[in-house]
Amino acid sequence: MGVHHNEIKKIGKIYGVVFKRKFKRKITLFILSGFLLTSIIFSTGIGCTFVSLNTVMAAIFNVLTLGGNSANLQYTTVVIDVRLPRAVMGALVGGALAVSGCILQSMLRNPLASPYIIGVCSAAAFGASLAILFQAEIGSIPMLGVLYVPVFAFIFSIAAMFFVYYFSRVRGKISVEGLILIGVATMLLFSALTSILQYIAYEELRSIVVWLMGGLWQVSWKHVIIAFPGILLCVTITALFSRKLNLVAIGEETALSLGVDVEKLKKYLFVLVCLLTAFAVSFTGPIGFIGLIIPHIMRIFVGNDNTVLMPASFLGGAIFLVWMDVAARMLIAPAELPVGILTSLFGAPFFIYLWHKNKGRVLG
């Protein structure tokens, strides 16, 4: 009887620990969601021209009610047409890059993996540079209009995805080592092609260089409307694979023994990561290190379970980029820094720390 009672107590303790852990994770996601919403609202009031919270809320309320209360709305254009789309796009891009990094780190079982190693960002940079160099001809295409730069960046991103996928296969299977090596080679190839375009550019050189630094200053609601469904759909689909990704992160043999088609899963995840990265960088330019550092920060709070880590990474990446964008427009106001410079300044020391901490694991 005593033994039976002790067993019940042990089981109760185990269930108690599991319940506590799940509750803590749900609370963390709830807090992150609330912080993201407040970050977007507060960030729209901060800039070269300060707008009070009451005015921000009145402007948003006015739009939602199709012109309700018109008091204190002299800053409506600044809030609704300029800063709010920047904040929303920053949240989408930061979240997309963070989820991409989270997936790659689990799939490749490499803590230093990030979206940049698959070559998609460099291909997007080449496509955008090409569009800027020939903007007079490309911008006049009726179907493109002002979206010619994001469209060309996206097209070349997808082309790079197929290139890396095709050449990283060994006997019909995606090789992890091959994926990294071909991805890095693709990145270097498109970086060299972009450098050639910069070399032959004259009047367009400054526009190319500024785009390559990454920023949100040219974002409008038109860009948000196009990017939002694509990013949301990709993030939703990746969440469906999170449990299987947990098994792959433990080991491919373990995943296979439990009935997971590892090759098919890697193929789907690779395509999703490429699409997320392409949607993100096509509208803002390359913004580095978010996919590397945010998943590691979120692991401190929610652990390694991808069912929780993925949404936490999305929220964390979104919050991070929203506030980085605020810092970018405040540090040298009234001028503005490209946000990609700030994320690199923040991320590079963190990368060095990660390398020092994990070099045995990466090299071994």
Image (cartoon, grey):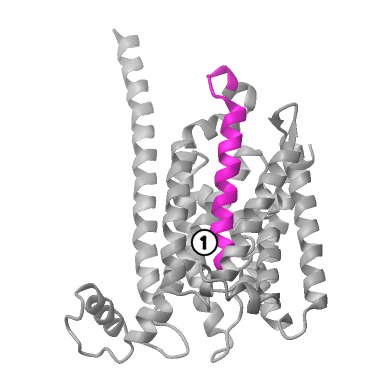
**Residue 198 horizontal side relative to residue 295, left or right:** right
Q: Nearer the viewer, residue 232 or 357?
A: 232
The structure residue drawn at horizontal position 35% and vertical position 10%, both measured from the top left corner, is 3
Q: Is residue 197 visible?
A: yes
Vertical position of residue 11 compared to residue 174: above or below: above
Segment colored magenta? 256-284
Image spot of residue 179 (x, y percent): 72, 41
Q: Farthest top residue?
A: 1
SS of the residue under disc 1: helix
Q: Is residue 294 visible?
A: no
Vertical position of residue 189 compared to residue 78: above or below: above
Q: Nearer the viewer, residue 59 or 81?
A: 81
| 258 inside magenta stretch | yes
Q: Quadrant of residue 138?
A: bottom right
How many numbered circles does the render carry? 1
Image quarter (top left, top right, bottom left or bottom right) of the C terminus:
top right
The structure residue drawn at horizontal position 36% and vertical position 82%, both measured from the top left corner, is 79
Image spot of residue 54 (x, y percent): 26, 83
Vertical position of residue 333 compared to residue 99: above or below: below
Q: Amino acid at mark 1?
A: Gly
Vertical position of residue 173 compared to residue 347: above or below: above
| 214 inside magenta stretch | no
Q: Quadrant of residue 81?
A: bottom left
Q: Nearer the viewer, residue 207 or 308?
A: 207
The structure residue drawn at horizontal position 38% and vertical position 27%, both measured from the top left corner, is 14
Image spot of residue 121 (x, y percent): 66, 59
| Magenta stretch secondary structure, dominant | helix
The structure residue drawn at horizontal position 73% and vertical position 58%, both measured from the top left corner, is 352
Residue that carries the numbered disc 1 in the rendered image: 94
Image spot of residue 4 (x, y percent): 32, 10
Q: Residues within 10 Å of mark 1 (few under 14, many from 20)?
A: many
